[in-house]
Image (cartoon, grey):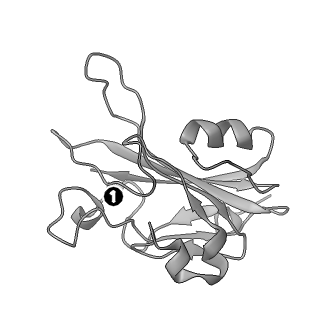
Amino acid sequence: MTTPSDEFRLVSPRVNHEGRLPRQYTGEGQGAKKNISPPLEWYNLPEGTKSLALVVEDIDAPEPDGPIVPWTHWVVVNIPPTVKGLPEGFSGKEEELGGEYSGIKEGHNDWKVPGWRGPVLPHHGHRFVFKLYALDDELHFGHKVTKQKVLEAIEGHVVGEAVLMAKF
């Protein structure tokens, strides 16, 4: 039996679970303090984890003419299990940070560009789900990584999931 302290967890030092997403992580921040990827940390990786994948979505995004369809803000794959988190402003800096971070790959969001893109919303109250998948294998992709490709590739390889939710 696992206790809450043993659970695979995803947290942010800047975002409380079910708390507000601060402006600097959105498209509504000011100047250089906008569209910065939030810092994330994780604990208690499941046994057998060989890599991690992260998908961040606005689960309350409406289609212009229809139903609610999740909108992808960030996709990150091939995070080594030795990495314990992603620092604030990580997006776009994998190479610069080097070391363990250099093999991490950012996928395309729903704006069709790689990396983090924060929300700009006509009305607030949307829920953002940060979902971290612990995998028993590394993912191998061509040049372009998307949420759909990640979800297909991880099928049968997920050994754990951790979720952080924020509101904007």
Q: In the drawing, does residue 123 fall left or right of residue 116?
A: left
In the image shown, does 111 or 63 lie closer to the viewer? 111
Q: Is residue 151 above or below residue 5?
A: above
In the image shown, does 122 or 99 lie closer to the viewer? 99
Q: Is residue 163 above or below residue 99?
A: above
Q: Position of residue 133 (x, y in %)?
A: 66, 52
The residue located at (44%, 71%) in the rendering is: 39
Helix or strand or loop: what does disc 1 sit on? strand
Q: Residue furthest right?
A: 48
The residue located at (50%, 66%) in the rendering is: 11
Q: In the drawing, does residue 155 fall left or right of residue 119?
A: right
The residue located at (50%, 80%) in the rendering is: 96
Q: Is residue 28 above or below residue 109?
A: below
Corner quadrant of residue 77: bottom right
The residue located at (22%, 63%) in the rendering is: 23
Corner quadrant of residue 10: bottom right
Q: Quadrant of the N terminus?
A: bottom right
Q: Position of residue 2 (x, y in %)?
A: 75, 60
Corner quadrant of residue 147: top right
**What amino acid does circle 1 point to?**
Gly
Q: What residue is shown with label 1?
A: 19
